[in-house]
Image (cartoon, grey):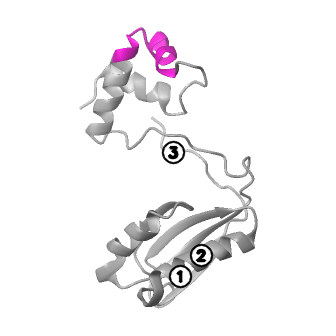
């Protein structure tokens, strides 16, 4: 369970930490608690799974990655977790996850997001994934982004 201070901390940080040299101190000042308490509470919320992560969320378009492709892969169910771990470890894959198939129209069960400055760059990176997977991938495709529909997480 979370208490009122945890809830206030989540609300204060869910949109991002302040862009100042000491962000935890700034949050602490807003909440009227010590910076050490802010950090300890965030660590506890992470450890308990109340929040999933604290990290930077870049605007891919602002840093020049305007060709974004969700690569989708048809891999055997018995190896999707192992294959997903390998693909997710690639430095150019920003996130990788398993999804259910929707047969017969949609055979893909592994998704890996790849960013690049051109569609050819994304295709080249998909080719690297294809090489890594070899015969473990029966088919794949790339779904290129055409616009941003949502760029925020769940809000309290």
Percent position (x, y) of residue 82? 33, 73
- Label 2, label 1: how far apart the Cα atoms are: 6 Å
Q: Residue at x 48, y 18 (%)?
A: 27
Q: Which residue is mark 1?
A: 130
- Residue at horizontal 60%, vertical 20%? 20
Q: Quadrant of residue 49?
A: top left
* Residue 114 sits above or below residue 131 on the image: above
Secondary element at tag 2 = helix
**Is label 1 in a helix, a strand or a loop?**
helix
Instruction: Quickly name the residue at label 3.
Output: 153
Tell me if 147 is positioned left or right of 91 in this view: right
Q: Which mark is residue 126?
A: 2
Residue 139 appears in the figure: yes
* Quarter of the rendering occupied by the N terminus: top left
| Mark 3 vs mark 1: in front | 1
Residue 107 appears in the picture as rendered: no
Marked residue nearer the N-terminal end (3 or 2): 2
Q: Is residue 95 left or right of residue 47?
A: right
- Is residue 27 on the magenta stretch? yes
């Amino acid at each position: 369970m979370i208490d009122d201070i945890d809830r206030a901390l989540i609300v204060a940080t869910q949109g991002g930490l302040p862009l100042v040299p000491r962000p935890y101190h700034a949050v602490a000042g807003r909440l009227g608690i010590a910076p050490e308490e802010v950090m300890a509470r965030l660590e506890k919320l992470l450890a308990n799974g109340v929040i999933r992560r604290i990290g930077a969320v870049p605007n891919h378009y602002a840093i020049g990655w305007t060709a974004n492709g969700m690569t989708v892969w048809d891999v055997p169910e018995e190896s999707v977790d192992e294959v997903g771990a390998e693909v997710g470890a690639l430095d150019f894959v920003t996130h990788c996850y398993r999804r259910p198939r929707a047969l017969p129209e949609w055979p893909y069960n592994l998704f890996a997001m790849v960013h690049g400055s051109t569609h050819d760059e994304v295709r080249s990176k998909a080719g690297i994934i294809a090489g890594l997977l070899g015969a473990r991938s029966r088919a794949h495709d790339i779904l290129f982004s055409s616009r941003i529909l949502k760029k925020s997480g769940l809000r309290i």
